[in-house]
Structure formats: C-alpha cells, structure tokens
Image (spheres, rainbow, N blue to C red):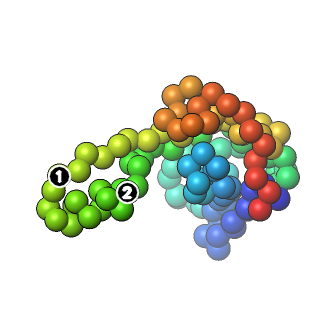
C-alpha cells in the first residue's frame, strides 16, 4: 500500500505516506470528527493508487545539521532555512510543484510502497 489509513476513535481519518523528497511522512485528514475544525481532503479510497485532492503544501524549516547544532550549543547564531513541499497525488504518483524547495521540484514520481 502507498498510503496508510489511520482511523481514530474520535471519528477522524488520516492518510499518511512517505515523501521521498523530504525523507519523512506527510499526512492529511480525509474525515474530521464532529466539531473538529480544519481542512479535509478527498481521496478515491484506493490505498495502492491513491488520488488526493486538492494539492498538499507542507511548509517548515530544514533540520539543523550537526555543525549548526553544535554552533547553537556554543551560543552562536544560526540562520534557519525555510522549506516547502507542494504536490499533487494522482493515481499513485506524486507530482511536485514548481514552488518546492527540494531536489524533486517539478518532477513526478511513483509513490513508495509501504
């Protein structure tokens, strides 16, 4: 399967998958519990060749390198690096958008089987 389905006892359902560009997991809600606020994506209920709509955009900060971490420990200032991973998932493929800050910017790849 390319996405993991997590059903919470509260009634929420989360889809989670591995992003090879970020080397971590990304997730979206496809169902929210009654009274729970936040965005909800649609999907085709196919764990092997999922289509999720609309696009997903994950923003964050690049983790510190070991050198940067040591500098912070010494009290030195370290500049953070903002990151963006923006993509569409269509028929089991991840199509990365042009505003991604990683090496797969603009590329389309097969999702990784879990």
**Looking at the picture, how far across and down is residue 76, in whole percent?**
15, 56
- Which is more toward the observer, 16 or 103? 103
Image height of 64 relative to 57, above or below: below
Q: Residues within 10 Å of mark 1 (few under 14, many from 20)?
A: few
Tell me if residue 86 can be seen. Answer: no
Q: Quadrant of the N terminus?
A: bottom right
Can you tell which quarter of the image residue 12 is in?
bottom right
Q: Residue at x 72, y 33 (%)?
A: 108
- Name the mark on residue 113: none
Residue under circle 1?
77
* Disc 2/disc 1 C-alpha distance (Å): 14 Å
Q: Residue at x 41, y 49 (%)?
A: 62
- Quarter holding the C terminus is bottom right
In this rendered view, identify the residue nearer to me: 22 or 25.
Answer: 22
Q: Among all residues in the image, which is located at the extreme front?
A: 67
- Is the residue 38 above or below the residue 34 in the image? above
> Which residue: 53% across, 58% down?
35
Dot 2, how many residues are within 10 Å of its Cα: few (below 14), some (14-19), or many (20+)? few
> Residue 94 at x, y = what percent?
71, 39
Is residue 4 something one can see in this rendering?
yes
Number of numbered labels in the structure image: 2
The x and y percentages for residue 18 are 66, 55
Residue at 23% x, 50% y is 78
Task: Give the quarter of the image for residue 24.
Answer: bottom right
Name the secondary structure under disc 1: loop
Q: Where does label 2 land, which residue?
A: 65
Give the left or right position of residue 36, taking residue 50 as reference.
left
Quick one: label 2 or label 1, which is nearer the N terminus? 2
Q: Position of residue 37 (x, y in %)?
A: 50, 52
Quarter of the view holding residue 52: top right
Question: For numbered disc 2, what is the local secondary structure?
Answer: loop
């Amino acid at each position: 399967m390319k996405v993991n389905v997590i059903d919470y006892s509260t009634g929420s359902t989360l889809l989670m998958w591995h992003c090879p560009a970020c080397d971590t997991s990304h997730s979206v809600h496809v169902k929210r519990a009654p009274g729970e606020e936040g965005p909800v994506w649609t999907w085709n209920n196919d764990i092997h060749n999922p289509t999720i709509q609309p696009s997903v955009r994950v923003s964050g900060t690049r983790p510190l390198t070991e050198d940067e971490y040591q500098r912070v420990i010494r009290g030195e200032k370290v500049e953070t690096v903002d990151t963006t991973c923006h993509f569409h998932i269509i028929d089991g493929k991840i199509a990365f958008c042009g505003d991604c800050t990683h090496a797969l910017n603009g590329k389309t790849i097969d999702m990784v089987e879990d």
